[in-house]
Amino acid sequence: MDEFSIIDNFFKSIEKNRSGLVLTGIGDDAAVLNVPKGHELLVSTDTLVGSVHFLLDWPAEVIAYRALATNVSDIVAMAGTPTWCSLALTLPELNEVWLIRFSKGFANALEKFNIDLIGGDITRGPLTISITIHGIAPIGKAVKRSGAKVGDVIFTTGSLGEGAYAVSKLKSAPYHSKVFTKLFFPEPRCAYSPLLRLFANSAIDISDGLSSDLSHILKASGVGAILYEDNLPLSEVLKDKIPKLHQTEFILDSGDEYELCFTVPKNKKVDFLKKINDNDMCCYEIGEITESHSFLLKQSNHQMTPIKRNGFKHF
Ligand code: ADP
Ligand code: MG
């Protein structure tokens, strides 16, 4: 089997045109795509390197799902709708069983997120998956990191901690254990995109850890923040697993969450929460944007302490 039969057997075979926007897909020198009138194109690339971002013995379906889900999360964090992606795959060898499982997992994820695969590349080398995802948003409606304003209320779409907890258990728990659900099958918060477009001044997805990711918003927006320790949402299943003393730090530093962190102007908060309620959705109010450039934690005893940014760093 050569690279062309790999493309035909495993990737051309899972091609669909769900968006109706793909004019030319897999097989030509480039894909040709239609951006619907009144929309802007959002583009993001994420690369997952074997033994760095995932372990080589993870199930191929998990690697495929996670690769696409984390890319989807980037488009959602801009308040966009993901539309299509390309897949650059670097493989150490031709392992047909692995490829069958990978492409099946990838096809399922494409279906789940309603995305088209429009092309890619296959090369030989250490296992690496690089996805470029595109999405659309109505003109001017993409939500950026740079839009936070003094007085904004800071929210997350979910509780935190399970990402870091799963990573800590990789050597000791079997992969089918429930502990790994959030790490292996992250759920990008697609349903929140329309609400972000209506209400949010700024947004980011939590991949490296709340403290690190929120500080990107603060830097890009030239503002500071106070987080309320009492409101920081630790995942329910971790309450008896993480000692009380370490819970705050755990929430602030846990990566691989793919929850959204976003800010809403104070005067829109009531309408926003009503929409959340009406749609049976969930979110946690965790703090406020401040004028000073400091990033502080208001502790249970009302004392303020600086927050350290301890999220994942590549270098
Ligand atoms: P080129 O030599 O022009 O770069 P390739 O042989 O790399 O073309 O790819 C042929 C076609 O197959 C292109 O349309 C490319 O986008 C597509 N393709 C290559 N690898 C993949 C992949 N992993 N998934 C989907 N499409 C792919
Ligand atoms: Mg090529």
Image: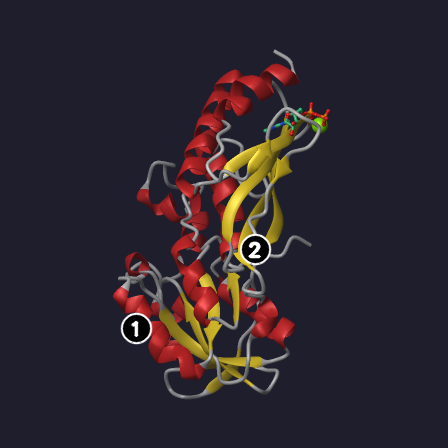
Placement of 282 over or under 28, stated as above or below:
below
- On residue 15, the disc is none
Q: Where residue 146 appears, x then y in whole percent?
A: 61, 71
Q: Where residue 20 appears, x then y in whole percent?
A: 49, 38
Between tags 1 and 2, which lies in front? 2
Between the residue at mark 1 and the residue at mark 2, the CA separation in whole angstroms equals 27 Å
- How is the structure coloured here? secondary structure
Can the viewer see residue 59 in this picture? Answer: no
Residue occupying image coordinates x 45% and y 31%: 107
- Corner quadrant of residue 5: top right
Residue occupying image coordinates x 57% and y 81%: 224
Residue occupying image coordinates x 33% and y 40%: 177
Is 34 left or right of 255, judged from the image as shown? right
Q: Secondary structure at mark 2?
A: strand
**What residue would you read off at disc 2?**
39
Q: Quick one: label 1 or label 2, which is nearer the N terminus?
A: 2
Residue occupying image coordinates x 47% and y 21%: 100
**What residue would you read off at disc 1?**
274
| Tag 1 near tag 2, CB within 8 Å | no
Can the viewer see residue 213 in this picture? Answer: yes
Q: Secondary structure at mark 1?
A: helix
Give the residue type that dot 1 points to.
Lys
Placement of 31 over or under 186, stated as above or below:
above
Q: Where residue 142 appears, x then y in whole percent?
A: 55, 62
| Most foreground residue, 9 or 210 | 9
Is 82 left or right of 216, judged from the image as shown? left
Q: Where residue 302 appears, x then y in whole percent?
A: 40, 88
